[in-house]
């Protein structure tokens, strides 16, 4: 999230993040749980992010079809985890997340 913030080229006076407190943000920040219920901009960003993620997962499925990204949309579904255990990680896997189950 900090990397994304660092790439914003327009001025902003507040950061709203869903349930995550970011360190080092130089403007006021709010991080309520379920921020999308309180802020329309967070709800809209969540929809955009999910559509982008779904398209990305479809592309990943074409590149690495054995992992079932097309159907699980990036979530740690049992089939996906079993494939990681069977054939290993791809360069696309987040190793920090995968450490929870492999």
Image (cartoon, rainbow, N blue to C red):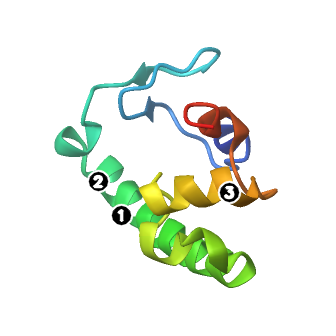
Figure quadrant of the C terminus:
top right
Q: Secondary structure at mark 2?
A: helix
In this picture, is 96 found above or below 50?
above
Residue occupied by mark 1: 47
- In contact (CB < 8 Å): disc 2 and disc 3: no
The residue indicated by pointer 2 is 43
As rendered, which of 25 and 73 lies closer to the eye? 73
Evaluate if marks 2 and 1 touch, with contact meaning CB atoms under 8 Å apart. yes
Q: Looking at the image, can residue 1 be seen? A: no
Q: Is residue 92 above or below residue 24?
A: below
Label 1 to label 3: alpha-carbon separation: 33 Å
Q: Residue at x 54, y 22 (%)?
A: 27
**Position above or below: 35 against 20:** below
C-alpha span from label 2 to label 1: 6 Å
Q: Earlier in the sequence, mark 1 or mark 3?
A: 1
Residue 102, labelled with which disc? none
Labelled disc at residue 86: 3
Give the image quarter of residue 96. Answer: top right
Q: Seen in the image, is 39 located left or right of residue 54?
A: left
Disc 1 and disc 3 in contact, CB within 8 angstroms: no
Q: Which residue is at 61% across, 68% downward?
A: 67
Q: Is residue 61 left or right of residue 47?
A: right
Tag count: 3
The image quarter containing residue 55 is bottom right
Name the secondary structure under disc 3: helix
Q: Nearer the viewer, mark 1 or mark 3?
A: 3
Position of residue 98 in the picture relative to residue 6 (left or right): left
């Amino acid at each position: 999230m900090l990397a994304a913030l660092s790439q914003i080229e327009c001025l902003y006076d507040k950061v709203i993040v869903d349930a995550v407190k970011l360190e080092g943000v130089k403007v006021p920040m709010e991080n309520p749980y379920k921020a999308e219920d309180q802020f329309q901009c967070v709800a809209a960003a969540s929809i955009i992010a999910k559509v982008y993620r779904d398209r990305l997962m479809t592309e990943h499925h074409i590149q690495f079809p054995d992992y079932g990204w097309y159907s699980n949309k990036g979530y740690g579904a049992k089939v996906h985890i079993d494939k990681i255990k069977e054939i290993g990680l791809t360069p696309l896997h987040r190793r920090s997340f995968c450490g929870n189950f492999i």
